[in-house]
Amino acid sequence: MDIERLKRMANNKSNWRERLQAVEGLAVMDDQPSKDILARLAIHDPVFKVKEAAFRAAQARKITYAGKPIYLGKKPKGNLVKEINKKLVIVRDKLEEGFTLEDFKRKFSEMYPEIYDTYEGDKGDQLDKWLSNVIPSLPKKK
């Protein structure tokens, strides 16, 4: 793949799988733009799987950031996005009474694609369980 396509894939904030594919493609390239993109993803990507893959690729190629080695911190705990509960309340309030979990996920991904992608990438198979626990604990409608 060419660098421009990989750059577009790496910048797609609403598809963590595409960013992960971009990391795999960038890992075999040996030019400065690919190193810069890998460093950025290793430091700033909100989905830990992508961040870790970019970190491993950067580490294998001895890529530094501002002259210092890149470190992989711990996987974040708690809310990944500031004020996520407010956003989830907005999604819930847009749905009819008696909505299903699938309805909620569809609406959530339509309204907040980047946030949905972050949580889907982070929670993986546990996303449904997490949403099932969080939705009932959201503040009630006024």
Image (cartoon, rainbow, N blue to C red):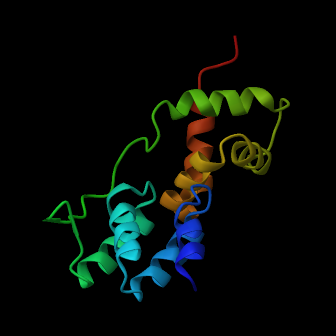
Q: Tell me where residue 5 sits by quadrant.
A: bottom right
* Residue 132 horizontal side relative to residue 110, left or right: left
Q: Nearer the viewer, residue 38 or 130?
A: 38
Q: Residue 86, position in %: x, y?
A: 57, 26
The answer to whether residue 141 is above or below residue 36 is above
Q: Is residue 73 visible?
A: yes
What residue is drawn where x is 79% and y is 29%? Answer: 94
Q: Is residue 87 above or below residue 81?
A: above
Identify whether 61 is placed above or below 142. Answer: below
Q: Position of residue 59 (x, y in %)?
A: 24, 78
Q: Residue at 42% across / 58% down in the picture? A: 45
Say how many tags the image has: 0
**In the image, farthest residue toward the bottom:** 28
* Picture quadrant where residue 98 is located: top right
Could you tell me which quadrant the N terminus lies in? bottom right
- Residue at 61% x, 31% y is 87
Residue 139 position by quadrant: top right
104 with respect to 50 (left or right): right
Residue 119: horizontal and vertical position, in percent?
Answer: 54, 52
| Residue 53 visible in rendering | no
Identified at 43% across, 45% down, the residue is 80
